[in-house]
């Protein structure tokens, strides 16, 4: 599974866009694109989804218990 950083950077490059062009197309600040591509924390979910929308994707909260194998427990 790819990280958000890997996914966005790869897709942007496949589209042949600079970070600046990508920011303009998605309607977010260049700093948002840079934060995502550098793997910085403290991202705004709404802004991240605005970026991902260009590729037909979105982020949503997921319960970690749903991702764990049936016989594995997740510590809080």
Image (spheres, rainbow, N blue to C red):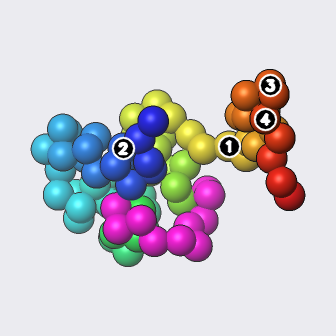
Residue 60's label in the rendered image is 1
Cα separation between marks 3 and 4: 6 Å
Most foreground residue, 3 or 22: 3
Q: Position of residue 49 (x, y in %)?
A: 55, 49
Q: Which residue is mark 4?
A: 72
Q: SS class of the residue under badge 3?
A: loop
Q: Are marks 3 and 1 in contact (CB under 8 Å)?
A: no
Residue 70's label in the rendered image is 3
Most foreground residue, 69 or 41: 69
Q: Determine crowd level at label 1: few under 14, some 14-19, many 20+ residues with C-alpha closer than 10 A.
A: few
Q: Residue reaching furthest top?
A: 70
Q: Earlier in the sequence, mark 2 or mark 4?
A: 2
Q: Residue at x 80, y 47 (%)?
A: 74
Q: Determine crowd level at label 3: few under 14, some 14-19, many 20+ residues with C-alpha closer than 10 A.
A: few
Q: Which residue is mark 2?
A: 7
Q: SS class of the residue under badge 1?
A: loop
Q: Is residue 59 above or below residue 39?
A: above
Q: Are marks 2 and 4 in contact (CB under 8 Å)?
A: no
Q: Earlier in the sequence, mark 4 or mark 1?
A: 1
């Amino acid at each position: 599974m790819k990280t958000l950083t890997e996914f966005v950077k790869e897709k942007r490059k496949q589209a042949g866009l600079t970070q600046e062009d990508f920011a303009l197309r998605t309607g977010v600040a260049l700093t948002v694109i840079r934060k995502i591509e550098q793997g910085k924390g403290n991202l705004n979910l709404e802004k991240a989804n605005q970026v991902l929308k260009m590729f037909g994707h979105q982020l949503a909260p997921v319960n970690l218990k749903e991702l764990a194998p049936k016989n594995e427990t997740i510590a809080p």
